[in-house]
Amino acid sequence: MPTNESIKVRAVDPDDFKAWLPLWEGYNTFYGRTGSTALADTITSSTWARFFNPMEPIFALVAEQDNELLGVAHYLFHRSTSLIGPVCYLQDLFTVPKARCQGIGNRLIEAVIVQARLAGAERLYWHTQESNDVARHLYNKIAKHVGFIVYSLEVGPLT
């Protein structure tokens, strides 16, 4: 079992792809994107490339112990109509099942908070499924649930 002190959180590196991919696939599987509903490989490769493109406002952190990646956090910055400074959205947070409830998710969120502060962000927010009780237990210790319900619509390009 990992100990909080032995976990290193760092920015993802281009050489991490092979170790990052199972985390990405685990995250997507957790949210039902597997088999016939799996994300296209082009989405995965585009997402990976964006982490290293200085023109993109999307970033990735990984939690590592003994050269093994145990968790990942993807976050991005955007503007808001209710704040002057940027807002940070923690889009994806995932820890491998064997390392859950060991403080890795908390360490990743703390690292995103640092990055948000460094970028001058005025707010950090994220979403999770209502049924994600384990994650919500952690999130309720860190942030305030503000009661919003999320609606989503896939619009696609104009044809």
Image (spheres, rainbow, N blue to C red):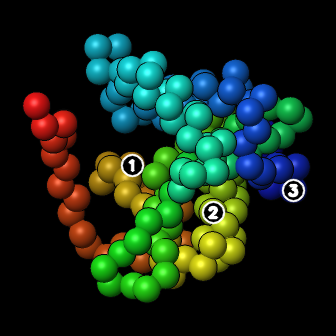
Residue at image mark 1: 132
Residue 121: image quadrant is bottom right
What distance separates the C-alpha of mark 1 from that of mark 3?
A: 26 Å
Q: Nearer the viewer, residue 18 or 27?
A: 18
Label 3, on which residue? 5
* Residue furthest top as drawn: 35
Q: Amino acid at mark 2?
A: Val
Does label 1 or label 3 sit earlier along the sequence? 3
Whether residue 155 sits left or right of residue 107 in the image: it is: left
The amino acid at mark 3 is Glu
Camera sees residue 137: no
Give percent across and percent down for residue 93: 53, 48
Quick one: SS at disc 2?
helix
Residue 38 at x, y = what percent? Answer: 36, 21
Estimate the spatial distance between the alpha carbons at disc 2 and disc 3, rounded to whole Å. 18 Å
Q: What is the crowding at mark 1: few (fewer than 14 residues within 10 Å), some, or many (at least 20)?
A: few
Q: Quadrant of the C terminus?
A: top left
Measuring 49% from the left and 75% from the top, which residue is drawn there?
A: 86
From the viewer's side, name the closer residue of 137 and 13: 13
Q: Do the numbered discs 1 and 2 sit on residues whose CB atoms are within 8 Å? A: no
Q: Point out which mark residue 112 bears.
A: 2
Helix, strand or loop at label 3? It is helix
Q: Secondary structure at mark 1?
A: loop
